[in-house]
Image (tube, rainbow, N blue to C red):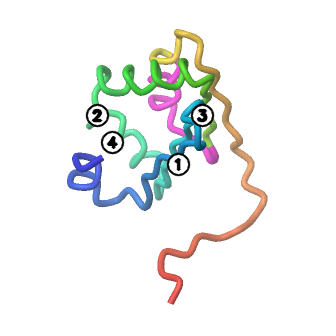
Amino acid sequence: MEAVEANEPRLIAFNIYANEDGTEASGVQVHPDAASMESHMLLLGQTKIADAFEFLEQKEGRIEVYGTPSGRVFEMMKQITGSGVPVSAKTDHLGGFTRCDAS
């Protein structure tokens, strides 16, 4: 996680959560745009991302994208997750907002 924080200044949030017994885990990333997500995937490289997806498979994980990924990001996800991690995208933003500073 330190590499992500140090090398991705545009990434708004990067968090990982697990349930108490460690059988389920979720990662939450908030990017300002599709280019930031693409940069994230390129930075981590295929090997580290493949390791993350292997972890997701063991935890019955899935990938959910909220927003519209670039064609390149979506293809990278499909290629890497060919091992069986389901990927879904919810591209129709119906409303809402993001606060970066709650003060």
**33 in relation to 18, above or below:** below
Q: Mark 3 to mark 4: distance in Å?
A: 27 Å
Residue 68 at what x, y percent from top left?
A: 60, 43
Q: Mark 3 to mark 2: distance in Å?
A: 22 Å
Residue 37 at what x, y percent from top left?
A: 42, 43
Using residue 42 as the reference point, say whether residue 63 is left or right of it.
right
Q: Amino acid at mark 4?
A: Ser
Q: Amino acid at mark 1?
A: Val
Residue 28, label in figure: 1
Residue at image point 57% right, 25% down: 59
Residue 95 at what x, y percent from top left?
A: 75, 64
Q: Earlier in the sequence, mark 2 or mark 4?
A: 4
- Please report the bounds of the magenta region as a residue range: 66-78
Residue 92 at what x, y percent from top left?
A: 74, 48
SS state under label 1: strand
Q: Earlier in the sequence, mark 3 or mark 4?
A: 3
Q: In front: 35, or 53?
A: 53
Residue 24, label in figure: 3
Disc 2 crowd rating (10 Å Cα; few below 14, some 14-19, many 20+) is some
In the displayed image of the protein, which residue is found farthest to the bottom? 103
- Answer with the quarter of the image where residue 97 lies: bottom right
In the displayed image of the protein, which residue is found farthest to the right? 94
- Answer with the quarter of the image where residue 47 lies: top left
Please identify, in this view, whether the residue under mark 2 or under mark 4 is nearer the observer.
2
Disc 1 crowd rating (10 Å Cα; few below 14, some 14-19, many 20+) is few
Q: Earlier in the sequence, mark 3 or mark 2?
A: 3
User: Residue beneath label 2, please?
Assistant: 44
Residue at image point 37% right, 27% down: 49
Q: In front: 83, or 73?
A: 83
Q: Earlier in the sequence, mark 1 or mark 2?
A: 1
Report the predominant secondary structure element of the magenta stretch.
helix
Q: Earlier in the sequence, mark 1 or mark 4?
A: 1
